[in-house]
Image (spheres, rainbow, N blue to C red):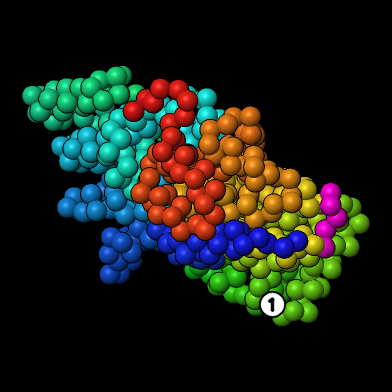
């Protein structure tokens, strides 16, 4: 399968575009918190926030962040911390994060928080989402202020700004100030959004007192507390955080502490922490007959796959492949655990089996590594971006090739659109033009689609995800897209993409 000249030019242009939204953290840097970082010696605000955002468990990360924002962060640093949090969150649509932080900010500095809310309101999308843009006759997005939307490095839905009311109405404030704050806030929503402030339940928890307590306890007190916890409570965020703290304080006893967690828990991050604290002890435990859960064993093996010697890696893969019941699932468990730590190596290994389900499953796990956190997706997205499917397709059956081409990447694109819409658009376009004989979409149909023809549209695949990404990128960052188009060496495709760039709002009247 030869790559035409146009695709080579696309690949070159794609690789040359800077990745402004990408954090450079590696997957194995996301480790459980083992203390409250602001109590550690000589920790600056950026140091504390980096440690908090590298906590992989959202049920631990965000209550700890809220506690820091609520009590321990100097008031003079609130705005700088807010913007740094948005960056570390790792998404261009940080709705839940903004919905968590603005009320905390308003409780401390209401006038500052209200001023920030007014600023943020200008870059709000009032109606619609990028995934609504898969057909040209769908309703377009509706934004508050197009110029401000385009100037911002991130965008929001109006619901993320709707939770300040209780903080602004605090009866402890002077009466006239309180009334003025509430009037200004309500008028902002009425004028800009045509509605009153209303905030749905946040996706992030703002308070967990037990969690904060266990991250401060001494080892013996913590051990006593955790051992007294009943089975039903063992799945709580506080218990998970307490186990991580015990492991850090007494790594030689990590096996004992991990056993405090339910066997059906996602143990990946605790096992990753163990591998950093006592690798030799973890290796011994992996092969011990007392380890009764093969799923936990394969998770631990996957974490170490890239660091063990080749003969050990082969032994583990062979053992997973020989499991009597459902061997593909056992192998996939191992490869998926590997993909959470070193995604590209796991993809390279998965590609050797010629099985589209294995390959696509490993890619999906790389991008969605356990509990949902945007910044944890970055290493996996980088791996998907760098993985060359052309190397494995020649060895697959025609049926397998069609399955890979159809299923590859489109669920990952949903996350990618939230992380970096422009990069998602470039990747999707590269993908659709990379395989001209794959029947994903013909060149002619792609050109017609990019010129507004809904007869060439599709659903729940890379075609519709790419159209969504390209249209949203054209709405949000048209100058970036224009520069990218100019670098392509295919005049006909340039013309089609330029039509998309100049008509991103679709066939209905724009809601701008």
The residue lying furthest to the right in this view is 324
Q: Which residues are magenta?
A: 395-399
Q: Is residue 399 visible?
A: yes
Residue 352 vs residue 101, the one in the foreground: 352
Q: Which residue is mark 1?
A: 308
Queried whether the magenta region covers residue 115, the answer comes back as no
Position of residue 52 in the picture relative to residue 359 (left or right): left
Which quarter of the rendering shows the C terminus?
top left
Residue visible at 65% across and 76% down? 307
Residue 270, horizontal then vertical, whole percent: 58, 60
Quadrant of image for the N terminus: bottom right
Q: Measured along the vertical axis of the image, is residue 418 above or below residue 334?
A: above
Tell me the residue at 31%/19% (across/down). 195
The residue closer to the viewer here, 104 or 139, is: 139
The answer to whether residue 430 is above or below residue 251 is above
**Secondary element at tag 1:** loop
The quadrant where residue 177 appears = top left
Main secondary structure found in the magenta portion: helix
Q: How many marks?
A: 1
Q: Quadrant of residue 406?
A: top right
């Amino acid at each position: 399968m030869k790559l035409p000249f146009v695709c080579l030019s696309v690949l070159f242009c794609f690789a040359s575009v800077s990745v402004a939204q990408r954090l450079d953290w590696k997957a194995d840097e996301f480790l459980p918190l083992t203390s409250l970082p602001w109590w550690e010696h000589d920790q600056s605000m950026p140091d504390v926030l980096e440690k908090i955002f590298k906590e992989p468990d959202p049920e631990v990360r965000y209550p700890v962040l809220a506690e820091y924002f609520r009590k321990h962060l100097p008031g003079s640093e609130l705005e700088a911390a807010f913007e740094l949090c948005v960056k570390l969150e790792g998404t261009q649509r940080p709705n839940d994060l903004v919905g968590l932080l603005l009320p905390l900010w308003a409780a401390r500095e209401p006038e500052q928080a209200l001023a920030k809310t007014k600023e943020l309101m200008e870059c709000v999308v009032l109606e619609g989402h990028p995934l609504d843009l898969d057909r040209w006759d769908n309703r377009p997005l509706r934004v508050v202020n197009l110029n401000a939307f385009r100037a911002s490095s991130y965008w929001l839905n109006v619901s993320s700004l709707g939770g300040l009311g209780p903080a602004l109405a605090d009866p402890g404030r002077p009466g006239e100030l309180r009334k003025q704050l509430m009037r200004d806030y309500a008028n902002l929503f009425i004028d800009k959004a045509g509605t009153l402030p209303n905030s749905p339940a946040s996706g992030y928890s703002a308070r967990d007192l037990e969690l904060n307590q266990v991250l401060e306890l001494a080892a013996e007190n913590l051990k006593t507390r955790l051992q007294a916890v009943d089975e039903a409570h063992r799945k709580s965020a506080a218990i998970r955080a307490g186990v991580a703290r015990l492991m850090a304080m007494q790594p030689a006893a990590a096996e004992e502490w991990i056993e405090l967690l339910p066997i059906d828990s996602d143990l990946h991050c605790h096992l990753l922490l163990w591998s950093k604290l006592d690798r030799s002890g973890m290796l011994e435990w992996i092969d011990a007959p007392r380890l009764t859960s093969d799923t936990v064993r394969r998770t631990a093996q996957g974490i170490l796959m890239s660091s063990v010697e080749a003969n050990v890696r082969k032994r583990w893969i062979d053992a997973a492949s020989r499991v009597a019941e459902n061997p593909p699932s056992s192998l996939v468990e191992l490869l998926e655990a590997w993909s959470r730590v070193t995604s590209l190596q796991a993809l390279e290994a998965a590609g050797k089996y010629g099985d589209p389900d294995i390959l696509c499953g490993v890619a999906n796990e790389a991008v969605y590594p356990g509990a949902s956190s945007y910044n944890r997706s970055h290493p996996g997205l980088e791996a998907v971006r760098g993985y060359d499917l052309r190397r494995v397709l020649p060895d697959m059956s025609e049926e397998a090739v069609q399955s890979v081409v159809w299923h590859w990447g489109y669920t990952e694109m949903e996350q990618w659109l939230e992380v970096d819409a422009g990069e998602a658009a470039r990747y999707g376009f590269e993908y659709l033009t990379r395989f001209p004989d794959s029947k994903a979409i013909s060149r002619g149909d792609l050109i017609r689609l990019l010129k507004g023809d809904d007869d060439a549209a599709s659903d729940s695949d890379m075609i519709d995800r790419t159209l969504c990404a390209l249209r949203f990128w054209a709405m949000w960052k048209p100058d970036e897209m224009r520069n990218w188009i100019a670098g392509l060496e295919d005049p006909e495709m340039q013309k089609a993409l330029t039509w998309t760039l100049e008509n991103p709002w679709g066939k209905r009247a724009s809601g701008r």
